[in-house]
Image (tube, grey):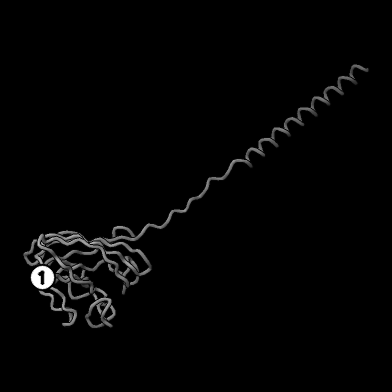
Amino acid sequence: MKFLMYLSLFCGALLFSCSSNTGNEQDSMDEEADMVAEPEVVEEEPSEATAMASISAASESDVSGSVSFTQTGDSTVSVEIDLTGLTPGSHAMHIHQNGDCSAPDATSAGGHWNPTNVAHGKRGESDEFHKGDIMNLEVGDDGSFSSTVEISGWTIGGEDNSNIVGHAVIIHAGADDFTSQPSGAAGARVACGVIEATNM
């Protein structure tokens, strides 16, 4: 009889010990799970919007090159110009309305890009100027031109009245006088390139 009583007590103690160990193991597993750090979510900085126009000859010129665009602010675009095959001297550079360089003389590009319907003028100096008015390029004896300029009032993929994508870059045979209407009497179009988005 005593034997059965001792056996019962021993078994009870053994079961209690097993139950206690199982609980401790579970607590330990829970603690380890809590200690596992969740993976850190790293938010990538939005990349800058970019676009490019591959410049091809028009009007039987030898001009070629590229004009690259990078949006650097809400309405500011950096313009990197790299051209060869130009004649020495001043050459007007504008953005024209149509993204079409199919005509041999590039007249398919239409007139200046002018969504606000104002008079032609000199950017930064005139009270009014076209959105597509840029600058005169001063070309040396080697016929090449490379420069980077900042243009305000433009976007890459923004509102219609600021978005340069889908328009055309035109290089003219002569200088823009910034006075003659509607386009500065800059002469023939010697190069053309459609502005296409490369990252928006």
Q: Is residue 63 above or below residue 110?
A: above
Tell me: 105 left or right of 95: left
Residue 40, horizontal then vertical, whole percent: 52, 47
Q: Residue 92 appears in which quarter of the rendering?
A: bottom left
In the picture shown, does residue 115 fall above or below 33? below
95 shown above or below 81 = below
Question: In this view of the protein, which residue sits in the foreground, 123 or 156?
Answer: 123
Number of numbered labels in the structure image:
1
The residue under the point 25% across, 67% down is 166
Residue labelled with disc 1: 173
Q: Quadrant of residue 100?
A: bottom left
Q: Is residue 118 left or right of residue 191?
A: right
Residue 161 percent coordinates (x, y): 31, 74
Query: Can you say which quadrant of the picture contains the N terminus?
Result: top right
Left or right: residue 65 versus residue 161 is left
Q: Residue at x 64, y 37 (%)?
A: 32
The residue most toward the right is 1
Between residues 118 and 122, which one lies in front from this camera angle? Answer: 122
Look at label 1 and name its amino acid: Ala
Residue at image coords 28%, 76%: 124
Residue at coordinates 86% horizontally, 19% vertically from top-left? 7
